[in-house]
């Protein structure tokens, strides 16, 4: 029975390795479906970890990388080894070992972030180019070209610069926020792959527990300490130590992003409490990103919820009345 199971596992691994290679090639060379192919590419390895274990999945990943490199060049093979395989195997380990959904996402986020950093390091080492810097410069050039276009249409340059001032400041700031962008990118990749993997695995009879409802998400109260820490680091490092100043800047923005998200969840719960229509809530979210005053209000709501658990208090009050 042992050899038969081993042969069946290796056969399944070979088939799924070929599928991984095909999806990686599609993600690289077929623009129409490349995003969808990139999302699905790790799932065969996830399936293999669940069904056959880690060893077969790693072997299949190496075979897929070899096939991809032969068919599409070395970059395809590297993409499989460094990008698709780690997230697929991490997701499979989480499901196989029945980790909590939040733990799976956190582990996958760490793996995806490490993958992004390794890819960035290899790009810098081989090509001597930082792809993020190139992207930021392209965005700045695009904004300048847009200003010139509107200027040729007769719009005053000063008014255009005033209108695009906030965007220009963001573009100048983004290179210093690269660590936060990489961590945020890893978290986004982990969340998307978790949801996609969950949907695909369900088709094969593998049930993966869902994350808790978004309305129940809440940061730990300790997040409040990151605001003064980030501020102090920024002040101490300003003009003296660029690394310390950059660390403070990234910590501050990280805390602000989390508290803004938490504030939006509080506002959504508030509207839900009084039965407001969904379109009104979406308008509120849109205004929160465009109106500075409302943005501040949402941030304060996030602070209050992190410190005093507003939604929990509302829920207890509602249960007491019922």
Image (spheres, grey):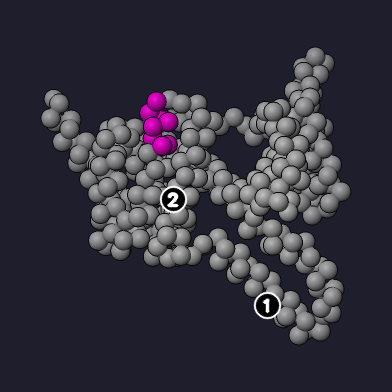
Which residue is outermost to the front?
240
Residue 145 badge: 1
Residue at the extreme right of the image, as rendered = 293
Q: Which residues are magenta?
A: 90-97
| Residue drawn at (56%, 45%) of the image | 183
Give left or right: position of 108 versus 155.
Answer: left
Between 293 and 82, the residue placed more toward the observer is: 82
Whether residue 134 is visible: yes
> Badge 2 local density, few (<14 within 10 Å), some, or many (20+)?
some
Of residues 47 and 321, the one nearer the viewer is 47
The image quarter in which residue 54 lies: top left
Q: Is residue 94 left or right of residue 274?
A: left
Q: CA distance from mark 1 to mark 2?
A: 33 Å
> Which residue is labeled 2 in the image?
118
How far across and how far down the image is residue 124, in percent?
46, 60
Which of the pair 274/223 is nearer the observer? 223
| Relative vertical location of residue 47 with respect to residue 294 in this rendering, above or below | above
Secondary-structure class at tag 2: helix
**Secondary structure beneath label 1:** helix
Relative to 172, is 96 above or below?
A: above
Residue 256 vs 208, above or below: the answer is: below
Picture quarter containing residue 162?
bottom right
Which percent across, then down, holds residue 113?
Answer: 50, 45
Locate residue 222, reporting x and y percent: 69, 28
> Residue drawn at (74%, 61%), measured in percent from left and top?
169
Q: Main secondary structure of the magenta part?
A: helix
Residue displayed at 76% across by 46% down: 235
Q: Nearer the viewer, residue 96 or 276?
A: 96
> Where does residue 14 sit, x and y in percent of width and height?
22, 45
Tag in front: 1 or 2 = 2
């Amino acid at each position: 029975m042992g050899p038969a199971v081993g042969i069946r596992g290796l056969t399944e691994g070979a088939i799924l390795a070929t599928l991984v290679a095909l999806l990686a090639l599609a993600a690289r060379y077929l623009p129409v479906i490349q995003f969808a192919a990139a999302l699905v590419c790790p799932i065969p390895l996830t399936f293999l970890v669940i069904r056959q274990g880690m060893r077969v999945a790693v072997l299949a990943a190496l075979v897929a990388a070899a096939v991809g490199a032969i068919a599409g060049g070395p970059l395809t093979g590297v993409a499989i080894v460094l990008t698709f395989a780690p997230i697929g195997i991490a997701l499979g380990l989480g499901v196989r070992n029945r980790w909590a959904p939040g733990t799976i996402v956190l582990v996958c986020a760490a793996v995806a972030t490490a993958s992004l950093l390794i890819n960035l390091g290899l790009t810098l080492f081989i090509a001597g180019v930082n792809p993020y810097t190139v992207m930021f410069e392209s965005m700045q050039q695009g904004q300048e070209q847009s200003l010139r276009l509107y200027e040729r249409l007769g719009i005053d340059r000063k008014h255009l610069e005033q209108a695009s001032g906030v965007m220009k400041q963001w573009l100048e700031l983004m290179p210093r926020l690269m660590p936060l962008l990489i961590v945020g990118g890893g978290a986004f990749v982990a969340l998307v792959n978790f949801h996609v993997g969950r949907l695909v695995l369900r088709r094969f009879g593998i049930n993966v527990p869902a994350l808790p409802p978004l309305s129940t998400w809440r940061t730990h109260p300790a997040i409040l300490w990151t605001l003064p820490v980030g501020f102090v680091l920024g002040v101490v490092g300003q003009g003296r130590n660029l690394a310390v100043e950059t660390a403070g800047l990234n910590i501050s923005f990280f805390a602000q992003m989390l508290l803004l998200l938490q504030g939006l969840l509080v506002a959504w719960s508030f509207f839900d409490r009084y039965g407001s229509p969904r379109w009104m809530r979406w308008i509120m979210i849109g205004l929160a990103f465009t109106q500075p005053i409302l943005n501040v209000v949402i941030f304060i709501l996030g602070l209050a919820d992190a410190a005093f658990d507003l939604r929990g208090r509302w829920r207890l009050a509602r249960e007491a009345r019922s």
